Image (tube, coloured by chain):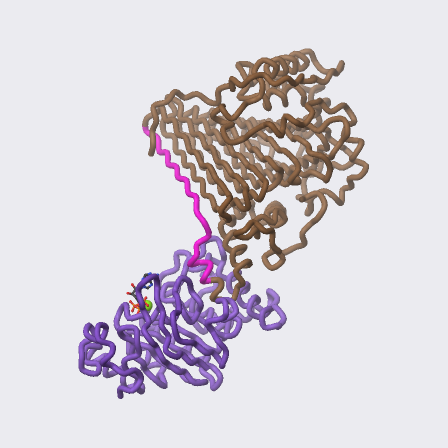
């Protein structure tokens, strides 16, 4: 157990200089007044605070220069239509997970590609922002109001200001959705703008349970910036199994934030497989707000040449008797750079906290780099907190063992990397979600980069089933 | 099958093998015994192609070709198998997957068809029964949390599945209970045939009681200091290495010049 006498502050807003970039707020007459005001408030915040720089604690390793070079403009209504004609359901990830599927192209839900309302029990709603606003009882307003006191950084504010559409999932108390609900975010190159601000809002009533899968893809074209926010609100005893498969092309820039608030005795498991983008930043902010809540966070980031992945994970124990488990693994090759920035906060009064944080990394080349920064702030008594971090290379004894059994060196490396990744991948279950995860990990190709960073063939190690081309790259 | 001729091996500045010469003809089982630290595992590792051992002189011919010129996976595909004294753990890699990857890699290298999952499963089931291993163990990661005896059984299982022409077994009998010892001996005996050979490194006569080697060699001070028939093992068991050829082992290691290799009887 490690304790540090530091005030229990979460991310503080950056004091970075304002960037000369005007945030365009979409003007929609149909939107309620509170939303217009919230958008404006968020835009003003961005103008006033600017974008974070590497001087900011949580952005030390991630430079936004490349991101800010992409023209910042809100995609107009119908932006998705340009390219979506070129998309067919055959381009979407397979196999189908069996439940409802919502396809979001450049920030807009595309009903033609979606299968909304499949396998949903009565009372469960999966809908667009416009539709959710019509029936809203104030919960969406809350969703925009959460950062009234100040945003953690400009990208979150930007999502509030410029979001076009949202996928809103509402589980009434006691609802049990057996089949996974899938949301596929596709980034298509479009002429007008290349920033997308997808948003997913999940409100799970007391005692409800569901599985949610987010998939991020892109198709060839110019660079695009995805700036996604997923908000999860779990009522008492609610359970959500959440999976993220992030596999955009290497010219994409990906930022996402999972903001979760857990009520009493609720349970969230969130599993990330991140392979895509030139930059991939996967923020997780979990507040354990109700007594006895439980969160499990797992991440596997596969970072190859020219890629940079950053995983800022904040777990905030704000109530007594909560449990948190984090296991993040990174595999970095070529001149790739991986970051794990795990921040654990135990608030005064959060007695009986049980928290564990582990980050393990495998470096496959001389130039590969990993920064791992566990931070613990413990301000309560009677807590059990453990953390560990490791950075290593492939075990030469294991490599020789495989070779002595006839496995060629390159393939032996793949086997060992797969073994390292296995601990996370097996947490994707044994069904279709697992199969998707294995295919994404395989398609990343990274795990066969050799010592010199040369991409190699993966055929001999590919899991069962065919690999898809097209979108999943 | 195997001809080792005046093999000198060093690690860094220290010479560990100082002129080992040994011949294992087709169809024979030879035992290598010798005190701790005498270089038995070094010899086994060099035959399998392990870094960072440096061969400074001598040669090794396997079926007439230069074994030392081959990378480890080529040696394996050519039929050389090393049973490890300390089998390695590979977390996250299921044993079944490991076995299939190994077998199919060797088959590919030899230009044979790969085995499909069904045929492979049948093969493993047949072989694992011979070594009395539960299927559940094979679903676990390679040697991960295996007991010492389970690891050694796993080595023998791998040998039975890969069917090498030359098996080099480094203390596969150490740390085994009586039943496991019988299993290991039976495994080696199963493979015994006119065109297969084995080099069995051991500290104990009890394995040799089961196997009955054609020759027993004693490695001490980096050389073979004595070779003989199966009776030599019994003699060593009774008197230890100290009586070998007169001088004590300690003096053998410092005055190897007084001992001629391969002639002592
Ligand atoms: N990687 C290494 N680096 C330095 N010295 C080594 C290395 N490997 C082996 N040695 C040394 O070489 C000598 C021979 O070791 P080896 O393992 O071959 O002995 P052995 O005959 O197999 O012993 P045992 O009966 O205990 O298994 C020992 O003195 C050992 O310390
Ligand atoms: Mg040894």
> Chain B in the picture: what colour?
purple
Q: In the displayed structure, does residue B133 sit left or right of residue B77?
A: left
Above-or-below relation of A423 to B153: above
Quadrant containing the C terminus of chain A in the rendered view: top right
Residue B227 visible, this angle: yes
Residue at the (39%, 37%) spot, across then down: A387
Q: In the displayed structure, does residue A400 sit left or right of residue A107?
A: left
Quadrant containing the N terminus of chain A in the rendered view: top left
Image quarter for ligand 1: bottom left
Q: In the displayed structure, does residue B135 sit left or right of residue A244?
A: left
Residue at the (51%, 31%) spot, across then down: A61
> Chain A in the picture: what colour?
brown
Q: Nearer the viewer, residue A253 or A36?
A: A253
Q: Nearer the viewer, residue A231 or A220?
A: A220
Q: Where is residue A329 in the image (x, y as percent from the top left)?
A: 49, 42
- The number of numbered badges drawn on the structure is 0
Above-or-below relation of A270 to A57: below
In the image, is residue A76 part of the stretch drawn in magenta? no
Q: Position of residue A90 (x, y in %)?
A: 76, 45
Above-or-below relation of A454 to B117: above
For the record, the magenta segment spans A382-401
Above-or-below relation of A65 to A300: above
Q: Position of residue B265 (x, y in %)?
A: 26, 88
The answer to which quarter of the image holds residue B151 is bottom left
Residue A173 visible, this angle: no
The answer to which quarter of the image holds residue B253 is bottom left
Q: Where is residue B202 in the image (x, y as percent from the top left)?
A: 32, 74
Q: Nearer the viewer, residue A409 or A326?
A: A409
């Amino acid at each position: 157990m490690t304790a540090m006498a530091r005030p229990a502050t979460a991310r503080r807003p950056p004091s970075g200089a304002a960037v000369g970039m005007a945030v365009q707020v979409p003007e929609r007459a149909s939107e309620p007044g509170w939303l217009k005001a919230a958008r404006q408030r968020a835009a003003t915040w961005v103008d006033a605070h600017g974008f974070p720089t590497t001087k900011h604690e949580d952005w030390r390793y991630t430079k936004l220069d490349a991101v800010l070079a992409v023209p910042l403009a809100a995609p107009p209504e119908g932006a998705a239509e340009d390219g979506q004609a070129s998309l067919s359901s055959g381009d979407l990830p397979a196999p189908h997970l069996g439940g409802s599927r919502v396809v979001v192209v450049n920030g807009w839900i595309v009903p033609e590609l979606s299968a909304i309302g499949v396998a949903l029990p009565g009372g469960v709603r999966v809908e667009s922002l416009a539709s959710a606003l019509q029936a809203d009882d104030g919960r969406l307003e809350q969703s925009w109001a959460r950062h009234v006191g100040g945003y953690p950084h400009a990208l979150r504010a930007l999502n509030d200001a410029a979001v076009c559409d949202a996928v809103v999932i509402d589980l009434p108390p006691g609802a049990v959705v057996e089949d996974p609900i899938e949301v596929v975010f596709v980034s298509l190159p479009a002429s007008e703008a290349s920033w997308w601000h997808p948003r997913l809002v999940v409100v799970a009533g007391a005692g409800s349970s569901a599985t949610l899968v987010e998939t991020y893809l892109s198709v060839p074209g110019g660079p695009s910036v995805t700036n996604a926010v997923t908000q999860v609100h779990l009522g008492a005893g609610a359970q959500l199994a959440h999976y993220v498969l992030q596999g955009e092309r290497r010219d994409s820039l990906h930022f996402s934030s999972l903001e979760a608030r857990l009520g009493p005795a609720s349970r969230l498991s969130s599993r990330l497989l991140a392979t895509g983008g030139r930059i991939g930043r996967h923020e997780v902010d979990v507040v354990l707000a109700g007594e006895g809540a439980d969160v499990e966070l797992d991440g596997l980031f596969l970072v190859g040449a020219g890629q940079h992945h950053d995983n800022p994970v904040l777990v905030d124990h704000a109530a007594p008797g909560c449990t948190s488990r984090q296991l993040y693994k990174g595999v970095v090759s070529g001149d790739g750079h991986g970051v794990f920035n795990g921040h654990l906060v135990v608030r005064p009064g959060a007695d009986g906290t049980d928290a564990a944080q582990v980050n393990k990394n495998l470096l496959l080349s001389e130039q590969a780099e990993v920064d791992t920064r566990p931070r613990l702030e413990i301000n309560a008594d009677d807590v059990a907190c453990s953390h560990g971090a490791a950075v290593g290379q492939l075990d030469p004894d294991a490599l020789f063992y495989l070779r002595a059994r006839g496995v060629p060196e390159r393939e032996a490396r793949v086997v060992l990397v797969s073994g390292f990744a296995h601990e996370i991948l097996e947490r994707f279950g044994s069904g279709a979600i697992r199969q998707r995860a294995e295919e994404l990990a395989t398609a990343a190709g990274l795990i066969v980069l050799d010592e010199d960073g040369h991409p190699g063939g993966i055929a001999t190690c590919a899991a069962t089933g065919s690999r898809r081309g097209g979108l999943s790259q | 099958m195997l001809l080792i001729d005046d093999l000198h091996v060093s690690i860094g500045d220290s010479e560990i093998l100082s002129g080992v010469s040994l011949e294992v003809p087709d169809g024979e089982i030879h035992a290598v015994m010798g005190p701790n630290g005498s270089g038995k595992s070094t010899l086994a590792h060099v035959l399998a192609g392990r870094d960072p051992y440096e061969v400074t002189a001598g040669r090794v011919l396997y079926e007439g070709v230069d074994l030392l010129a081959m990378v480890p996976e080529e040696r394996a595909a050519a039929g050389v198998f090393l049973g490890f004294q300390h089998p390695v753990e590979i977390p996250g890699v299921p044993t079944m997957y490991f076995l299939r990857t190994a077998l199919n890699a060797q088959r590919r290298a030899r230009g044979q068809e790969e085995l499909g999952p069904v045929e492979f499963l049948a093969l493993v089931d047949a072989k694992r029964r011979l070594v009395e291993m539960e299927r559940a163990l094979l679903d676990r990661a390679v040697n991960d949390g295996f007991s010492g005896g389970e690891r050694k059984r796993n080595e023998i299982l791998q040998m039975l599945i890969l069917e090498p022409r030359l098996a080099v077994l480094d203390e596969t009998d150490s740390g085994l209970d009586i039943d496991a010892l019988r299993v290991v001996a039976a495994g080696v005996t199963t493979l015994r045939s006119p065109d297969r050979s084995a080099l069995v490194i051991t500290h104990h006569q009890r394995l040799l009681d089961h196997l009955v080697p054609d020759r027993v060699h004693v490695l001490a001070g980096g050389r073979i200091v004595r070779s003989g028939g199966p009776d030599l093992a019994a003699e060593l068991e009774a008197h230890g290495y100290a009586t070998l050829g007169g001088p004590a082992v300690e003096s053998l290691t410092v005055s190897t010049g007084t001992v001629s290799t391969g002639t002592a009887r």
